[in-house]
Amino acid sequence: MPNIQHKYLRPEDLKRLANYRFAVQMMVEGWMSGKHRAKGRGASSDFLEYRQYSPGDDLRLIDWRVYARSDRYHLKTFEHETHLECHIFVDSSASMGYRSGGPMTKLEYASYFAACVAWLVIRGNDRASLQTFDADIRSFMPPGSTRKHLDGMLNLLEHNTPGGPTSLPASLEKSHHLLKTPGTLVIVSDFLSDPAALMQSLNPYLHRGFKIVLVQILDPHEVDLPSDGLARYYDMETNEHLLCNSETVRTAYRQRVQEHRAGLRALAMSRGIRFFSVTTDESYYQLFDALSE
């Protein structure tokens, strides 16, 4: 195993670690080193209420006396518990498979990030769900808080592969009924779509009280078009192509990308949605810092 200090773990280092779970753990522990550890929920004398058991909950929290009386599984909750649910949506469409020669594809970067978020949420004794999507919902794991549930999420993300075309608004509409309890919704995507349509599709979640975080993942060459001279560019989702000289379009291309990112950020801020944009050669730690604020 390579000798990599937690503090300096970079995206390219993750590819050198053969064990996916170990790589995610190293990244989470690296970020948390030197930070104050949050207190777990544990037991409390300030009983609040019972809630019905959901798949993925810790079986140790079941009140077996209530089960003996009602033949139903219920868990005790306490006054100081946060009841956080974090729902993680990962765009797994064809465009997320793009890689310009950097350390990893957009999808690999997004999947590692989603795995770390799930690890941090479940480590805090809260519940995390996971959905991968392209034009349709490809997979969905309901909220859970056990180590077994986390293992299932990591396994899904480790084997996550690019699918077909993207339709984020359509996927968000189909997903709305799957999320029973409002919580924090983290959507990880390249967001190469109409910002207004995206925001429109998020309205039902906002009306239900979800806190929404958008994390845009781009390849460095998507932000700063390289000087390749005469080149043919392909759309990874439609296979349409365009032959042009990169020197003649670089300035206009950069401006359009900047406008698109700025437009997403402005629309998100106007609705109380948090928006972050990074490229696949950037550290994950800045995202963790921003999410923890």
Image: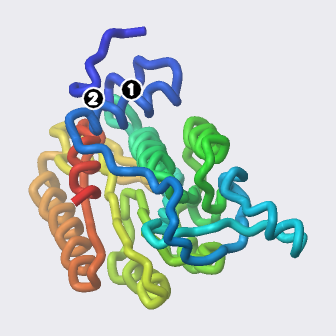
| For the residues bearing labels 1 and 2, Cβ distance under 8 angstroms | yes
Which of the 4 quarters of the picture holds residue 290?
Answer: bottom left
- Residue 238: tell me if it is visible: no
| Residue that carries the numbered disc 2 in the rendered image | 10
For label 2, the crowd category at 10 Å Cα-Cα, with few meaning under 14, some 14 to 19 and many 20 or more, is some
For label 1, the crowd category at 10 Å Cα-Cα, with few meaning under 14, some 14 to 19 and many 20 or more, is many
| Residue nearest the viewer, comparing 193 with 90 | 90
| Residue that carries the numbered disc 1 in the rendered image | 14
- Provide the secondary structure element on which disc 2 rests: loop
Q: Position of residue 43 (x, y in %)?
A: 53, 57
In this rendering, position of residue 28 left or right of residue 153: left
Distance from label 1 to label 2 (Cα)?
7 Å
248 in relation to 74, above or below = above
Q: Which quadrant: the C terminus?
A: bottom left
| Residue nearest the viewer, comparing 265 with 236 | 265
| Residue nearest the viewer, comparing 53 with 71 | 71
Q: Amino acid at mark 2?
A: Arg
- Residue 232: tell me if it is visible: yes
In this rendering, position of residue 230 left or right of residue 72: left
Q: Position of residue 2 (x, y in %)?
A: 37, 10
Q: How is the image coloured?
A: rainbow
Q: Position of residue 70 (x, y in %)?
A: 87, 75
Residue at 42% of width from left, 63% of height from top?
Answer: 186
Q: Which quadrant: the N terminus?
A: top left
